[in-house]
Amino acid sequence: MKLDVNALGTFYRMAREGAGIAAGRLTHMMGVETQVGVTKLNFMRGREIRRDFEDSTEKVGVRVKLTGAIEGYSVVVFERESAFRVVETLLAEAGPDAEIDGDVGEPDEFDEMTESAATEVGHIINSGFIDGWADVLEAVIDVSTPEFVEGVSAEPFFGDIDEAPGDDDLALLFQSRIETVGTEVGFNHYLFPKRESMSKLLERLRTSEGIEYDKLDGFDRMAERGAEEVAETATTLTGIDTSVEIRRLNFVSLEAIPEQVAEEKLVGVAFEFDGMPSGYLLFLFDEESAHEIVDAMVPMEVDEDGFGEMGTSAIKELGNIMASGFLDGWANVLDTTIDHSTPEFIHDMGAAAVDPVIIQLGENQDFAFVFDTVVVADGREFDCEVYAIPDESDLERALNNLDVDRIEDAKTTAEFQEVDTT
Amino acid sequence: MKTYGTEPGAPTPVQVGISELVVSDGDDTLKSYGLGSCLAIALYDPQSGIGGLAHVMLPDGDAADNSDRKPGKYADTAIRALLRRMVEQGANYTAVEAKIAGGSDMFEFESFGDGVGQRNIAAAKEELEKLGVPLEAEDVGGEHGRTVEFTPGTGSLVVKTSDGDDENGVTEL
């Protein structure tokens, strides 16, 4: 199975188109404004998908089986409370004539009525997505009758699906989020395609030589090393125990990248890197985390507004060493060297820090693979988001040069220098 | 972020995401969040109150293949698309005025050359000049991010920087 950027681009368009249709129908049905949030193609391991579900919130899902141009399962997942709120709105919309069994406000259980309403909503959303995909593919996709699922782990949602990826399998996951404006109703949508069906589709959509799917798997493992390196570096330099919380390989349109960044003032360190691949690397911290880092790295009391010269230099230094670690992780696996620029400090709106990078890449590409990493600390403020965005044609070449068998042996080591905070 | 089913007069500002453009004839507020090197281009006809906002990312759409599909992505094609849609809704071409904000250069990377922000500003000014649309006001360049809110009915373009909540961070163009 091989994929290329054109094929992934078509998948991305399918996801966007589907989310748009689903949101439109939801608006029509519920009479509320809806908004499509970030749409992503994720390459995720089965283990991570399952972990995503184990945040102890109760969830409700509606799933359908697909046959035809795409084979697999399409699943809409609501948080349980969201589902109740949707049902409430829907039944209120149906007018006073609708028979409502008791108070739907804070129910403990789904009864027949509410379960059927939730299933209806889920089905309409699923169908919206599927119609969008069928439009983009100009092909027919058949949908089974919807099935209502609830639970707190991934098991009831995917446990009995053969197509669901094993713990170590890298799955291509379509993920979209739709939210209603003003009320807190949101849901996630997942598509689990059958491998053969995906392979056939990729073959049809591919316009270039492309990348072996298995190499992508190797690349993901490589990114994992990069992420671990960042966490280790941060721990060594700041003395704050950190760990990798999220690590994902996304394929998104360039425009979607700044949308994903928090709408607040952030502190960041940015680099350009050069080699095979070249690209951009950004570390973004919320202000509190940045202050915590400065406190940990600069021994004396810093009594300055903002971050001052000393704070800025400490954060740049940390960024610099994390960047070396991250990129060394890549370079070792790819058996190449990747150089990076001196750090650029930024203390500004998060999106504004990202848009220059996507503009520069936008001259030659519409989509990007984004290596999303979130490093967090236990009990202390240390949230660091890492965005590594390589140049697309470089990445394709780098991937093709990748010897997948080598990855297991490659060791990554960052050199720790004295931190210069003067 | 695209909103479906926006009701007229809804208090929430209409978000204009990167590469998008929105034309409105009401008192809607059009908002683009977190512009770095991207440029916000606001056009309006003060007589009819029809106007629009584009959040452009690149300078030259005429040189790109996909500018037909995504006119809002490029400074030149976005300005033409805004004008066309405004005139279709009843704006008077000769009365249209422009305001722009954004186009910072946040980083000095080698690969950025002269600066991605500067290129967007230059392209927008050139296109406005070509079409004879007067540039009434601008808040461009520098090394900081901006969030803009544009009300076509009044032609007011409010620019906020990240020191946003005090008076220094807010400029009305």
Image (cartoon, helix red, strand yellow):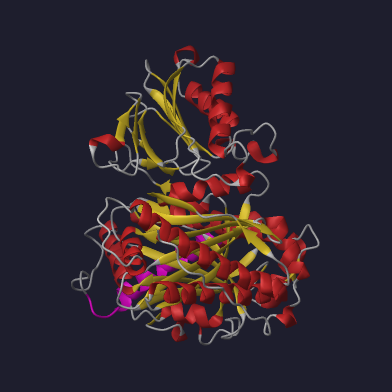
In this view, the residue in front, A7 or A294, is A294
Q: Which secondary structure is most common in the magenta stretch?
A: helix
The correct choice, above or below, for B58 with respect to A371 in the image is above
Q: How many marks?
A: 0
The magenta segment? A107-129
Q: Position of residue A364 (x, y in %)?
A: 68, 46
| Residue B123 is covered by the magenta coloring | no
Residue at 66% of width from left, 76% of height from top?
A217
Residue pushed farthest top? Answer: B94
- Please identify the quarter of the rendering in which residue A93 is found: bottom left
Q: Position of residue A24 (x, y in %)?
A: 45, 52
Residue pushed farthest right? Answer: A209
Q: Is residue A193 visible?
A: no
Residue pushed farthest front? Answer: A422
Residue at 71% of width from left, 71% of height from top?
A334
- Please identify the quarter of the rendering in which residue B124 is found: top right
Q: Position of residue A387 (x, y in %)?
A: 52, 61
The correct choice, above or below, for A358 with respect to A121 in the image is above
